[in-house]
């Protein structure tokens, strides 16, 4: 007969794996797109981060599915193999890798160590306490895991709280840096900075809210297994948001190209108008001058004709006289 804890654990793991599978599929598509577009040109640290994140998220999902099968066959009272702790550690590696890459990008952007070092220290603490708690559960059953949770509740709570705090700090730092540079760029670059700010806020909110939800559900005694769904989902949200942010550069470049194309068309049209107008301006004075010279010559010839006519008249008048 299935107990209440079995039902809660299975429900949480089922829900988490269902959503995580969909997220992993989208992450894989984004990873393929990244390899086609940016893998050759990106710096080494981004390549390493993408490889580690995708590999660990895949291992996390596979091991979680294997653990679910083991829980089905053996129940929650039997000792769980090392697959469950290993899958959780892979998830913590994904979280730490994504946060570390964001912190390094902040350093590349502002060339100051204060915020990146703070983020690295807090992310390392979060990874350390989460991994330590997971290692303590090796060799125990699912029920023993929940008993361990009561004794060392502060470890998982502080780990996920610090993870959410790092996400908020990274989001705030990105938005501040982008906003401070907004007044020194052109219109098309301002549009790109606005999109980057929105992406940073969306990513930070998604991961931090899920982490806070894990902390809340982890500390509620009556909901002992539902938080497992969010633990599984959070890993793949980190991976997916990072891949989306990296691949969004294609969209940003298209926006930049669009603005540049409009400017180029305006310059081309202006040049064409100049080419049409300048010959008219250059030709008109010359033609006017030629017409003026022709009129002057005609006038002079007319004057000369009149003078000769008058002279001939004068001679004929004198001879007749």
Image (cartoon, helix red, strand yellow):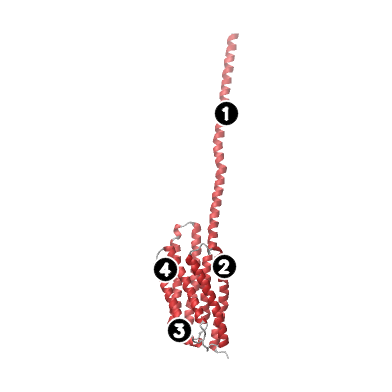
Mark 4: which secondary structure? helix
- Crowding at label 2, few (<14), some or many (≥20) Cα neighbours within 10 Å? few
Disc 1/disc 3 C-alpha distance (Å): 108 Å
Disc 1/disc 4 C-alpha distance (Å): 81 Å
Q: Which residue is mark 4?
A: 116
Q: Which residue is mark 1?
A: 294
Residue nearer the viewer, 216 or 244: 244
Q: Which residue is mark 3?
A: 136
- Crowding at label 4, few (<14), some or many (≥20) Cα neighbours within 10 Å? many
- Crowding at label 3, few (<14), some or many (≥20) Cα neighbours within 10 Å? few
Residue nearer the viewer, 35 or 99: 35
| Count of picture labels | 4
- In the displayed structure, 125 sits above or below 148; it is above
Instruction: Looking at the image, tell me whether mark 4 or mark 2 is earlier in sequence order.
Output: 2
- Crowding at label 1, few (<14), some or many (≥20) Cα neighbours within 10 Å? few
Instruction: Looking at the image, tell me whether mark 1 or mark 2 is earlier in sequence order.
Output: 2
- In the displayed structure, 234 sits above or below 107; it is below
Can residue 188 be seen? yes
Most distant residue in the bottom direction: 1
Q: Which residue is mark 2?
A: 32
Instruction: Looking at the image, tell me whether mark 4 or mark 3 is earlier in sequence order.
Output: 4
Q: Position of residue 27 (x, y in %)?
A: 55, 71
Residue nearer the viewer, 272 or 102: 102
Mark 1: which secondary structure? helix
Mark 4 and mark 2 in contact? Answer it, CB < 8 Å: no
- In the displayed structure, 184 sits above or below 104; it is above
Instruction: Looking at the image, tell me whether mark 1 or mark 3 is earlier in sequence order.
Output: 3
Q: Quadrant of the N terminus?
A: bottom right
Q: Residue at x 54, y 57 (%)?
A: 257
């Amino acid at each position: 007969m299935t107990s209440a804890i079995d039902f809660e654990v299975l429900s949480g793991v089922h829900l988490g794996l269902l959503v995580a599978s969909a997220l992993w599929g989208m992450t894989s598509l984004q990873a393929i797109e990244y390899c086609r577009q940016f893998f050759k040109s990106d710096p080494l640290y981004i390549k390493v981060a993408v490889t580690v994140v995708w590999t660990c998220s895949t291992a996390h999902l596979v091991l979680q599915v294997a653990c679910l099968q083991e829980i089905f066959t053996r129940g929650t009272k039997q000792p769980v193999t090392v697959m469950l702790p290993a899958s959780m550690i892979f998830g913590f590696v994904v979280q730490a890798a994504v946060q570390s890459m964001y912190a390094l990008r902040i350093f590349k952007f502002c060339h100051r160590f204060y915020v990146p070092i703070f983020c690295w220290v807090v992310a390392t603490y979060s990874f350390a306490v989460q991994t330590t708690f997971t290692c303590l559960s090796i060799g125990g059953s699912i029920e023993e895991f929940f008993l361990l949770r009561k004794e060392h509740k502060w470890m998982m709570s502080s780990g996920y709280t610090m993870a959410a705090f790092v996400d908020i700090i990274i989001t705030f730092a990105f938005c501040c840096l982008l906003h401070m540079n907004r007044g020194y760029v052109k219109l098309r670059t301002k549009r790109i900075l606005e999109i980057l700010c929105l992406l940073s806020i969306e990513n930070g909110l998604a991961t931090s809210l899920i982490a806070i939800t894990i902390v809340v559900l982890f500390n509620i005694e009556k909901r002992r297994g539902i938080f497992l769904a969010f633990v599984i989902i959070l890993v793949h949200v980190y991976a997916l948001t990072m891949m989306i942010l990296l691949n969004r550069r294609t969209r940003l470049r298209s926006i930049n190209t669009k603005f540049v194309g409009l400017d180029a068309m305006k310059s081309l049209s202006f040049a064409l108008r100049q080419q049409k107008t300048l010959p008219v301006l250059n030709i008109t004075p010359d033609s006017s001058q030629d017409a003026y010279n022709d009129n002057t010559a005609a006038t002079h010839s007319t004057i000369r004709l009149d003078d000769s006519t008058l002279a001939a008249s004068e001679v004929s008048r004198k001879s007749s006289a």
